Image: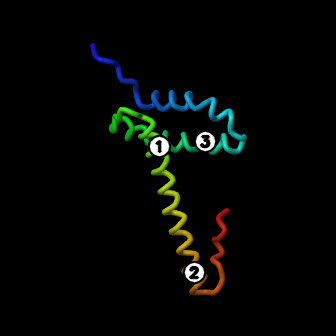
Amino acid sequence: MGRTVLPFSQVLEQEVQEWRKFRRGLRKEDQQFLDRLFEKARLHVQAGVYASRPWPFETILISMLLEHEKTLVELKSKLKALETDTTQTGTPSPSWPPP
């Protein structure tokens, strides 16, 4: 008989549990950042199912990186708009900094 493959959401939760000791060793504020990284990976569970990689942590890391890249692109876009607005008017936009 073949081996039963766990759903990727369960694989992800197992990884979170395996990193529990590492998490405990972190400072409180860093624990929150680690938790947020795993939350970002949860956004891509369906892609993880589809990828079906032999080392699921690779998929988890790529999911985290994907979310970071999206955030960077968004921030760069906002910064460019702010720089353009400042260049044109000589003063920063009233929408900056964000609330």
* Image quadrant occupied by the N terminus: top left
Mark 3 is on which residue type? Leu
Asked where in the image residue 8 lies, by quadrant, the reply is top left
Q: Distance between the Cα atoms at labels 1 and 2?
A: 36 Å
Name the mark nearer the viewer: 1 or 2: 1
Q: Secondary structure at mark 1?
A: helix
Residue 56 x/y as whole percent: 42, 34
Percent coordinates x, y for residue 80 in the rendering: 53, 74
Pointer 2: what residue? 85
As displayed, is residue 24 above or below residue 34? above
At label 2, which amino acid type do we have?
A: Asp
Which residue, given by chain and number where applicable, does mark 1 sit on?
A: 61
Image quadrant where one finds the C terminus:
bottom right
Q: What residue appears at the point 51 percent right and 27 percent down from the top-left corner?
A: 14
Q: Residues within 10 Å of mark 3 (few under 14, many from 20)?
A: some
* Residue beneath disc 3: 34
- Considering every residue shown, the one lying at the far right of the view is 28
Q: Earlier in the sequence, mark 3 or mark 1?
A: 3
How crowded pointer 2 is (Cα within 10 Å; few <14, some 14-19, many 20+) is rated as some
Residue in the image at 63% along x and 77% along y? 93
Q: Secondary structure at mark 2?
A: helix
